[in-house]
Amino acid sequence: MVDDGVATGATIKAALRAIRKRNPKELVLAIPVAPPALIDELRREVDALICLATPEPFLAVGAGYEDFRQVSDRRSVGLRASDPKAGTGFGKIPALEQRNRAAAPILSKHPPLYPANAGKFQ
């Protein structure tokens, strides 16, 4: 599972537990930023955790990004259509680019899960 970042952890934990009920071979969470206090809790929910930054103090997910504006559905679909690798990494987080490059081999081994159709995951 890939998310743009975790703040309280409530939503991501619910999603991870729902996926865990489907008995995946391996459950990996990849996030660019999260509060340090949540890391141990998140590790208990997954087989592997990739988190690029745990700033202290943690103010908000958006604080880890240079540009955290919302992306429209149309723009997102257009970007994915123009780049066959779209959706497989974290995108541009300038403050974390070096760590992002270091995590790329791990992410290629653990691709994100996407809904394939009604209730099934690839």
Image (tube, helix red, strand yellow):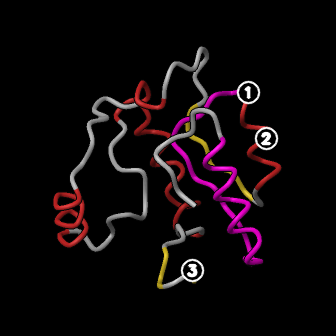
Disc 3 target residue: 121
State if disc 2 and disc 1 touch (CB < 8 Å). Answer: yes
Which image quadrant: the N terminus? Answer: bottom right
Q: Secondary structure at mark 1?
A: helix
Q: Please give the label number shown on residue 37.
A: 1
Q: CA distance from mark 1 to mark 2?
A: 8 Å
| Up/down of 79 relative to 45, above or below | below
Separation of marks 3 and 1 at Cα, in angstroms = 30 Å
Q: Residues within 10 Å of mark 3 (few under 14, many from 20)?
A: few
Q: Is residue 73 left or right of residue 113?
A: left
Quarter in which the C terminus is drawn = bottom right
Task: Give x and y (percent) for residue 28.
Answer: 66, 61
- Badge 1 amino acid: Ala
Circle 3: residue type? Phe
**Residue at disc 3, secondary structure:** strand
The amino acid marked with disc number 2 is Glu
The crowd level at tag 1 (other Cα within 10 Å; few <14, some 14-19, many 20+) is: few
- Residue in the image at 78% along x and 54% along y: 45
Q: Which residue is mark 2?
A: 41
